Image: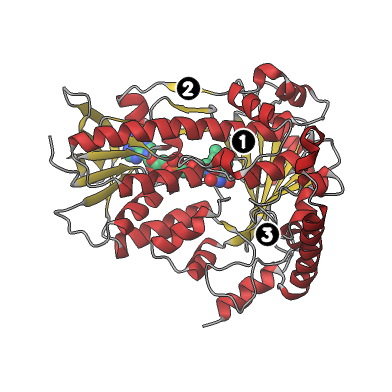
Amino acid sequence: MFDSVKSILIVGGGTAGWLSAAIIAAYHKNRSDEQLQITLVEASDIPTVGVGEGTWPTIRNTVREIGIDEKVIFEKCFAGFKQGGKFVNWVTQDDFYYHPFTVPLGYGQLDMAPYVSEIEQFALEANYQQEICEAGLAPRSLSEGAYQGICNYAYHLDAGAFANLLKNHCRDNLGVIHKIGTVDQIRRKDSGGIESLSLTGDEGPFDLSADLYLDCTGFRSLLLGDAMDVPFISNAQYLFNDRAIALRLPYDDEDAPLACHTIATGQNVGWTWDIGLTTRRGVGHVYSSEYLSDEEATENLSRYVGKSIDEYDVKSFKFKSGYRQKSWEHNCVAVGLAGGFVEPLEATAIMLVEVVARYIAENLPADQTAMKVTSKRFNSQMDYRWQRITDFLKLHYMLTQRPEPYWQAHRDPVSVPESLKEDLAIWKYRGPIKSDFDGVAELFPAASYQYVLYGMGYKPDYNRQSYLYKDEASAERIIQKNHLMTQQLLQTLPPHRDYIEHWLEQV
Ligand SMILES: Cc1cc2nc3c(=O)[nH]c(=O)nc-3n(C[C@H](O)[C@H](O)[C@H](O)COP(=O)(O)OP(=O)(O)OC[C@H]3O[C@@H](n4cnc5c(N)ncnc54)[C@H](O)[C@@H]3O)c2cc1C
């Protein structure tokens, strides 16, 4: 029993472990060790997953709040700006649409969808960021300061380098205690929570205990899944992908243009990702083993990169799409892959780590009673978030017109979650609006749904309430304003790679 949480033990030193440590430690930075001690232990011989290069715009605030200079992210993690996603060949086999991070002009006041020339042109006519991405420009100019953006952005970064940067920052600046050891045994209390862990380190066995445990052990889910036996809920009936291959691709030329958006290209089964870092590209293929063999996936990725990938160090991943029924059980919370994983489309995993770690930080110190309430609320929020993530990702698939069996199976109503069917029933006569997504547990704004829905050619039947959509004059003003802003930004924003180089040289 404890009066309040005075010690946290984070098990796992991947992105989830170190990012959680940094968020919680920075939030409680004025603490003393007696008030809150944060320890992270990781195995030296169990590698991290080593992928996770795309982030969500929340990362900007997170990095700022944990006290890392934005330039350091670019220098140490070879980062580039990510201004959204370009989805190629998801509707037919010859199309693309954008999900930019900047909300459409008029957002919250006037849904531009009824007024654009063609629904697929929504992102282009209601916002300037698509053109900025197509032109390969940075989201700001040298006169703006760190963390600022004319266009909203996140980062593309090297996952290993990011975890390393966080590790050093946590140890050197945030008072996180770092230990090396492999967890061999987890002892439970009679009341159900975790009592202590037995580990093996370089100098032999040792024990660790804490008031609160964060399970950041990746797909193993050693604490929450194995020891606490919290069931896994599969959502593979909605999202079929369960395999991925990934590799690091050098640029042909070190001054090659640097993409400022993730390129997700639909394949006969699944999709390939293409992420531009300053020093290399990260490319990969996510697919379903039910529809594609590993050999065929290798062929697809080779075709995508334009040469055989056999000469590269190709990493393979098997994953189960789904999440733990509860993310917080007694004194154990799962963060990162230990809590669940659907697939990397839209880079939700690191964003979820940020959300979860912030929630934990904000609710400490907690006594036993507060922790029960906190965990109950947390579990219901997480349940909702997993459902929303599933729905949002499924939306990218279910509006396809591609003929292959994999894509057609995604259109089958039995593969569409009921909650998404409900949303679509509402969006039959109007588009997604802000108030559809105003709860504390929301992860994506209505704008994200608009970009995907309209980009894939889904147009609500606005005629049913046509009197609501007679504001052609305002719409025309917005379209003109957007056109002007686009022209201005195309002339003033610097090329992405040039900007990063010059900015990093600035003192
Ligand atoms: C193919 C693929 C692509 C992805 N792309 C993205 C993306 O673009 N954007 C995004 O947000 N997310 C992405 N993700 C998810 C992202 O990679 C993870 O969410 C993120 O890296 C966090 O991983 P983790 O820290 O939970 O687990 P891991 O990186 O697996 O770390 C687990 C840690 O636990 C330790 N450990 C395990 N067992 C023990 C033990 N017995 N004792 C002690 N320590 C132990 C390991 O040593 C390691 O330090 C992707 C995932 C995959 C599979």
In the displayed structure, 226 sits above or below 479; it is above
Q: Real-space Cα distance between discs 1 and 2?
A: 18 Å
Dot 3 amino acid type:
Cys
Classify residue 129 as left or right of residue 164: right
Residue at x-position 78% and y-position 51%: 471
Which of the two labelled residues, at mark 3 and mark 1, occupies the earlier sequence position?
Answer: 3
Does mark 1's beta carbon lie closer than 8 Å to ligand 1?
A: no
Mark toward the start of the polypeptide (2 vs 3): 2
Q: Which residue is mark 1?
A: 392
Question: Mark 1 or 2 closer to N-term?
Answer: 2
State the residue at coordinates (75%, 55%). Answer: 126
Q: Tag 1's secondary structure? A: helix
Residue wearing tag 3 = 260
Residue flagged by tag 1: what amino acid is it? Phe
7 w.r.t. 161: above or below: above
**Residue drawn 34% across and 22% down?**
229
Q: Amino acid at mark 2?
A: Ile
Quadrant including the N terminus: top left
The mark lying in front, picked from 1 and 2, is 1
Q: Which mark is residue 233?
A: 2
Residue 197 position in % (x across, y down):
22, 34
Q: Position of residue 505 (x, y in %)?
A: 57, 80
Residue 459 seen in the figure: no
